[in-house]
Amino acid sequence: MSLTPIADFVRAYAASDTSRLHMPGHKGTGPLGCEALDLTEIAGADELYEAEGIIARSEAATARLFGTAGTWYGAEGSSQCIRAMLFLALQAAPQGEGRPVLLAARNAHKALLYAAALLDFDVRWLWPPAGPDASLCACPVSPDRLSAALDALEQEGRRPFGVYLTSPDYLGGVQDVAALAPLCHARGVPLLVDNAHGAYLRFLPGGSRHPMDLGADMCCDSAHKTLPVLTGGAYLHAGRGLLNPDPADVRGAMCLFGSTSPSYLILQSLDLCAGALAGDWPARLADCIRALDALKARLDARCPGLVRPSEPLKLVLDGAAAGRSGQELAELFRAHRVECEYADPRYLVLMFTPHNPPRDFDRVRDAALDAIAHPGTGEGPAALPAALWEDLERQAGQPACTIRQAVLGRQVRLPAREALGRVCALPTVSCPPAIPIAVSGETIGPAALRLLEAFGIGEVSVLA
């Protein structure tokens, strides 16, 4: 049986010379060159949210590759999968226990907040430990911190409907899912993981480090971030733990938050990815990781502290080690014809995959060595003081209203410097990575203003 039934069907249809009296309007021709492969739900093409044919077979093949109880395709990125995952966890939670609450690491994507607004649940935040490496993008959660947070909620008579982690995070940090999952399960709380940056972790040469193999109950992968998939391609995975939803319920949840016209180009891309993963792609991944490890070791030897430890496919550079900000490093790399994934006042993030040719490794090496040989005049940004994180955590613990009330309420945009004491409406993020500085419903305090300034955010949306 073919591993790529969707792509096989579309190619056969494109070659059939059939008159296309159906959507889309380009009728298979156009300037992009891919129009012949862009279809809708015609006979034989199956339907994403009621899949029984070629899409269902393709998803089943992908589920076997990932070793999951079920894997479902999304054509609207992890944002769609996050909302569906939270909906399913909320539906499975015991009813009649008051307002539902999610326990989540603070470095969550804004898609989580929009899900909270749509589904009307509260969020109790897990905060990063204060220290010189504290960052908006990273929030390592230790077993002790998770246990303490679960204890605190239990003392309030509340049990979260889920624990939500982002792993890997934007700076390449990976949560110890294997240690955290048993703590959740012992209390009957499912573990949900935003694994948008880690689809490839299932195929590591030393064995899988994918959240689903480490104990997560559900997770989402942005396939397009690290696998050979078009932008928007994503997976929603379910395991065999506390959450094992009926496949029809998963499709209903995905449909609830998705377009009824999913891109067939993206679906073909996900389908063809299954063929690649079953072929030589894992071997190519191993080669890529070896080459990147060698580059990291060389740069670290030349400039200790420049390379921040991270997951295998990220190279994260600490600008402070080169006397520059992350944004200044990004400009230097652009001069070497290298475009980064993300840069902030301290860090530069570069993402590799097996599809980067050797030339790309050479350019990154040369740019980094240039930065080392010609360090900047500064010392990089100062570490954010512990008091700042404490202030943010205090404000978050005393929200002025629910996330739903803030997101859907009447709002105005103000210069950030005028927002002190106002209630955040839409989440304020630097994009990428779209991690909120001020969360909807929280009062904007001095610490939030300092972070807004540091990340160059000049306007915020507040309740009117």
Image: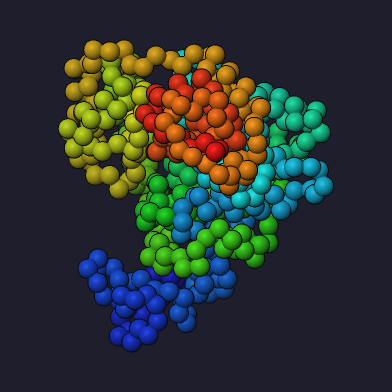
**Residue in the image at 52% along x and 17% along y:** 388
Left/right placement of residue 267 relative to residue 364 reads: right
Most foreground residue, 131 or 463: 463
The image shows residue 393 at horizontal and vertical percentages of 60, 23
Most foreground residue, 187 or 353: 187
The image shows residue 427 at horizontal and vertical percentages of 51, 38
Q: In which quarter of the image is residue 318?
A: top left
**Residue in the image at 31% along x and 12% along y:** 379
Vertical order, 385 against 455 (above or below): above
**Residue in the image at 81% along x and 43% along y:** 97
Most foreground residue, 31 or 177: 31
Vertical order, 452 against 410 (above or below): above
Q: In which quarter of the image is residue 451?
A: top left
Left/right placement of residue 408 relative to residue 25 reads: right
The image shows residue 30 at horizontal and vertical percentages of 24, 72
Most foreground residue, 222 or 423: 423
Vertical order, 253 against 182 (above or below): below
The image shows residue 3 at horizontal and vertical percentages of 45, 66
